[in-house]
Image (cartoon, rainbow, N blue to C red):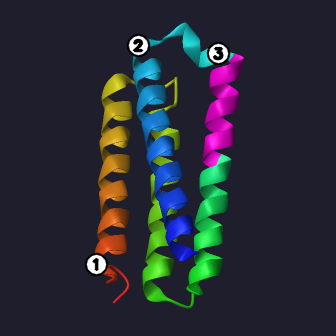
Amino acid sequence: MMDIFISLHLATLLLSVLMYFVNFAFTVKQSPYLEHAGFIKSRKVIDMITIMMIALVCMASGRAPFVDTVMTEKLLSTLAIAFMVFMSLQQGKNLFFRCFAFAGSIGWLFYVYSLAVNGEAYLLR
């Protein structure tokens, strides 16, 4: 059963990251698709499903943030990613700042991937 949860978790994460790339590209190009109701709703639904899958995997595996150091670090890194995503999609900022925040969010994403693969906390030792 855990294999199904992990597969769904990875699929929703990949879809969420893909939607973030598309959203960032539309933001940089100032595309009219950003205001399209279907695009806005699909982003929100995909992100909500991703968050629910993260919670489901935590419950199914029995590992929880603030109990397990790796999970705490994943949670803090996920909050850093959310902040960088927010900053990269801000319309009022200049392009260099948004691209810097985009690169930062991708860096934190690779860090969370490293935590998931290695299972060893680096920052909270």
Residue 47 in percent (x, y) is at: 61, 46
Earlier sequence position, callout 3 versus callout 1 = 3
- The question of residue 40 being in magenta is answered with yes
Q: Is residue 8 above or below residue 37?
A: below
Residue 61 in percent (x, y) is at: 56, 82
Nearest the camera: 109 or 116?
Answer: 116
Q: Residues within 10 Å of mark 1 (few under 14, many from 20)?
A: few
Q: Amino acid at mark 2?
A: Lys
The residue under the point 62% across, 23% down is 39
Q: Amino acid at mark 1?
A: Asn
Residue holding disc 1: 118
Q: Is residue 32 above or below residue 23?
A: above
Earlier sequence position, callout 1 versus callout 2 = 2
Residue 47 visible at all: yes
Q: Secondary structure at mark 3?
A: helix
Spatial CA distance of label 2 from label 3 is 13 Å
Whether residues under marks 1 and 2 lie with C-beta atoms below 8 angstroms apart, the answer is no
- The question of residue 39 being in magenta is answered with yes
Q: Amino acid at mark 3?
A: Glu
Earlier sequence position, callout 2 versus callout 3 = 2
Residue 122 relative to residue 33: left or right: left
The residue under the point 54% across, 66% down is 4
Range shown magenta: 37-47
Nearest the camera: 1 or 112?
Answer: 1
